[in-house]
Amino acid sequence: MTLLWKTAINQQYSEMTQNTNNLAAYIWSLADLLRGDFRQSQYGRVILPFTLLRRLEGVLEDSKEAVLAEYERVQAMNLPEEAQDKFLLRATNGLSFYNTSKMDLSKLGEAGIKDNLESYIQGFSKDAREIFEHFKFAEFIGQLNDANLLYKIVQQVRKTDLSPKAISNHDMGKVFEELIRRFAESSNDTAGEHFTPRDIVHLTTSLVFMEDDEALTKPGIIRTIYDPTAGTGGFLSEGMEYVEKLNPQAVMRAYGQELNPESYAICKADMLIKGQEVNNIKLGNTLSNDQLYAEKFDYMLSNPPFGVDWKKIEQDIKDEHTLKGFNGRFGPGLPRVSDGSLLFLLHLISKLRDSKEGGGRIGIILNGSPLFTGGAGSGESEIRRYILEADLLEAIVALPTDMFYNTGISTYVWVLSNKKAAERKGKVQLINGVNLCGKMRKSLGSKRNVMDDSDIATITRCFGNFEVVDARELDKHTEQKSNRGRQSANPKTEAPKTFASKIFNTYEFGYRRISIERPLRESYQFSDERIAELRFAPKPLTEVMKWAYAEYGEHWTDAVNCELYGDLTEHEEGIRNRIKTHYSELKEKQIKDLLDRKTWESQKQILLKAKQLQQAIGTAQHDDMNGYDDVIKATGINLDAKEKKQITDAVSWKNPQAEKVIKKVHKGKAKPVYGLFEVGGKVLEYKVDGDLRDNENVALDPSRPVNEINEAYFAKEVLPHVPDAWIDAGKKDDKDQEIGIVGYEIPFNRHFYQYQPPRDLVEIDADLDAVSGEIMKLLQEVHS
């Protein structure tokens, strides 16, 4: 790597200049007028659109007269709105918006100011006007007017010179970002849904951009940046600012889509202020309605919502997965409906610019579940498999907890690219930065920790150098413990705060899940107790039939001519009441079967046949089910399939001491590893005991044949413990058709786990004795 990215780290995160900071603070002082009449969380909904309005007014100042003159001319031509737009935009001398009203903030007057301001807003071109509509600005204008604040607000806003002559696009963008940040902090109950903290934005942006020296140095270079969950535009702004600082001659084109109308309005306003093409910012659900479906991008940054389900758009997603496959966005697989994070990741991957055209890079913030949720063959595992086998994943960075406004959970930055450097090919870097933070003086919602420039530099330097870092102790203060209550004489030693990085081959996160089977062993016995169960139908009717028989079957007999047997007509109401209170899971059809005499008579016939078999076979226990069918046939008692199954289920049970139950005799050679055993000169396949089935995860190793790896693992890890087991050769992976289903997971915490030995028992005993002594002393004081 060159020194360029190191310089970028030093320059990128310098504080906002005092002038722009003072200007943002002055604009935000409008909140002093709003206090009392508006909630704190509403301040930004007034301040942001007024700031935008004043900036747009200043930008349009030089072309105002030309636009008004052109407007009078085109109105006489009676053209459609689209055609008028072209003429009017031409009159702005290169701007992407205009205003046809003769008013400005200085001409609104005091009387009728509400109507005049609304009329002024309506004079803007469609894109600019739409921003105010999504801010619900008209609604707030009405509230300000009702509170007699509208005129005061307008007068204070108009005193602020936000024209390009007074403040550049770049500095105005920074001011607007600072206002957005203040807005997010003032409404931190919902800020996390639409606003990513600046320290996380800084880190993610650096990781994504730092590899592209060309974009950071070459004059006139054009790059695109995209955020499918744009929120208020923090990632887009940061990406543009990053490149602007290092290469002012580079052109960054921003694209985004946002679901929340208000956040969309803020983002679009920010892009308008920065001179971006606001048509590239879209409103709507990215997953179900991708409004930039034909676009590919150089850089993508996203902080999708954590753990949010996609049930509302489930059918749309499944249709795209089924009908388009890998020609759509979701070909690799679908995660469970309860968490759509991986859908956003797949969406971003589908937007990568082709590697032949320079490729693209992705930075996405995810919670822990995409790392490991879902076993082999699941949608989540197949998505991870696709990403790793396509060699798209460069690095994952573990962030400290308590970094976001609305959650304190563990979070990770994934960095992906389809243009990996040679040394990164086939590799993934895991960086453990959970301790790289400091405590905030004042929490903002759930955000209690913050990463400073040195913390961010530590991670980006490690990533940029692609280096392994053994657990290195950091100069970080340990968390202050409460001094309330009794303090231990021998407190537990706190684990040191460390930073570490490891590099893995992509295949090291993969495994092959093989199914281990064991033979079924059963005994049978025609005892009175087992046979008696046949009087009642199988579940779910068994228990309610037992109750009904005990309650109403006093005069029922097993005689052939017993006309009362199973007749519950007179008791239907009582039975239904009982079912309602005790067996509510029963459906109407099952209730009707219970009340039907035919059900009872059918079960009685099965019971009587079982008694006949008992007479012929006896009541002794038999531990070899392999002769069971022959024994039944020898009695000469005919059983249909239903009768035989019910009787067999009643008189048999699993018994570890019984003989193995043979399923089939095979021709050919024995393969005991795969369940074909040679016994007495025959090759036997045994029935499987599903309750004893187990799965083993065998690590992938592309240097050896799959069967060789599986069999070696089986011989070492399974056979010594269960010598009658075998591998199910029928469970094969859909993609490679080898035995065992391939799965992928990234057990991040396991790789960075630091063992902390428990305290010595002598120390624990001493503490317990001290506590016991204190308790006894307190009890004596109570009784004295």
Image: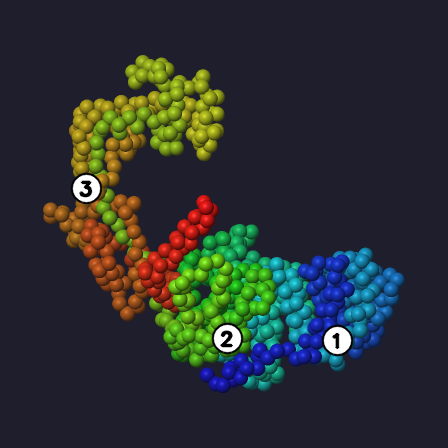
* Residue 41 spot, x, y in % from top left: 68, 60
Say which of 169 and 76 sits in front: 169
The secondary element bearing badge 1 is classed as loop
User: Which residue is under mark 1?
Assistant: 162
Query: What amino acid does circle 1 point to?
Result: Leu
Q: Residue at x 48, y 71 (%)?
A: 477
Question: Height in image: 474 above or below 590?
Answer: below
Q: Are marks 3 and 2 in contact (CB under 8 Å)?
A: no
Q: Residue at x 48, y 29 (%)?
A: 580
**In this figure, what is the number of numbered marks?**
3
Q: Residue at x 36, y 71 (%)?
A: 505
Mark whose residue sits in front, 3 or 2? 2
Q: Are marks 3 and 1 in contact (CB under 8 Å)?
A: no
User: Which residue is situated farthest in the front direction here?
Assistant: 784
User: Which residue is situated farthest in the right direction here?
Assistant: 111
Mark whose residue sits in front, 1 or 2? 2
Residue 444, image quadrant: bottom right
In 3D space, how far apart are the residues under numbered discs 3 and 1 (Cα atoms)?
88 Å
Query: What amino acid does circle 3 point to?
Result: Gln
* Residue 51 spot, x, y in % from top left: 73, 69
Q: Using residue 779 as the reference point, say whether residue 602 is left or right of it.
A: left
| Circle number at residue 657 | 3
Q: Earlier in the sequence, mark 1 or mark 2?
A: 1
The secondary element bearing badge 2 is classed as helix
Q: Earlier in the sequence, mark 3 or mark 1?
A: 1
User: Which residue is under mark 2?
Assistant: 455
User: Which residue is situated farthest in the left direction here?
Assistant: 680
The secondary element bearing badge 3 is classed as loop
